[in-house]
Image: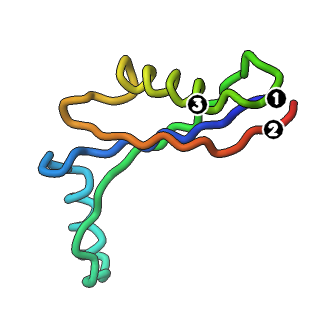
Amino acid sequence: MSIEVDVTIKLKHGVADPEGENTKKALNLLGFKRVRGVKSMKTFRIEIEPEKADGEEEEEVKKEVEEMCRKLLANPVIHEYEIQVVKSERR
């Protein structure tokens, strides 16, 4: 069994997003005049091998992924993130 977790990382409110701004400008130039804003985000899908066979460790997995975010995946100064368990399946 494995547990899949999605981590979505985005810039905090007020932090400049040049990639989003350039994408908005390009869309406007391509004729999509109603686009008023674009925000760039990054999503990681992480597959975790559970330690327990009872399938009751989603909260432990979330805590482990939270630590991954703090240590590597996100910069706490400029990023916020959301962790969501996507699915658990037998392998």
Q: Nearer the viewer, residue 34 or 83?
A: 83
**In this view, 39 is above or below 59:** below
Position in image of residue 18 (x %, y %): 19, 50
- Which mark, residue 59? 3
Q: Is residue 75 left or right of residue 53?
A: left
For the residues labelled 3 and 2, the Cα–Cα distance comes to: 16 Å
Report crowding for label 1: few under 14, some 14 to 19, many 20 or more residues within 10 A (C-alpha).
some
Locate residue 77, reporting x and y percent.
18, 30
Cα distance between the residues tagged 1 and 2: 5 Å
Task: Farthest residue to the right: give it.
Answer: 91
| Residue contact at pointers 1 and 2, CB within 8 angstroms | yes
User: Secondary structure beneath disc 2?
Assistant: strand
First in residue order: circle 3 vs circle 2: 3
Which residue is denoted by mark 2 in the rendering?
Answer: 89
Task: Locate residue 48, reporting x and y percent.
Answer: 66, 25
What is the spatial separation of the Cα atoms under label 1 and label 3, in whole angstroms? 16 Å
Q: Which amino acid, by three-letter code, is at mark 1? A: Met
Circle nearer the N terminus (1, 3): 1
In this image, 48 relative to 1: left or right?
A: left
Vertical placement of 18 versus 2: above or below?
below
Depicted 27 relative to depicted 76: above or below: below
| Residue 6 rendering spot, x and y as whole percentages | 55, 41
Residue at the spot 58% in from the left edge and 31% down from the top edge: 59
Seen at 32% across and 45% down, the residue is: 10
Q: Amino acid at mark 2?
A: Glu
**Which residue matches tag 1?**
1
Residue drawn at x 82%, y 22% is 53
Name which residue lies at 40% across and 26% down. 69
Which one is earlier in the sequence, the residue at label 1 or at label 2? 1
The nearer-to-camera label among 1 and 3 is 3
Circle on res. 55: none
Q: Secondary structure at mark 3?
A: helix
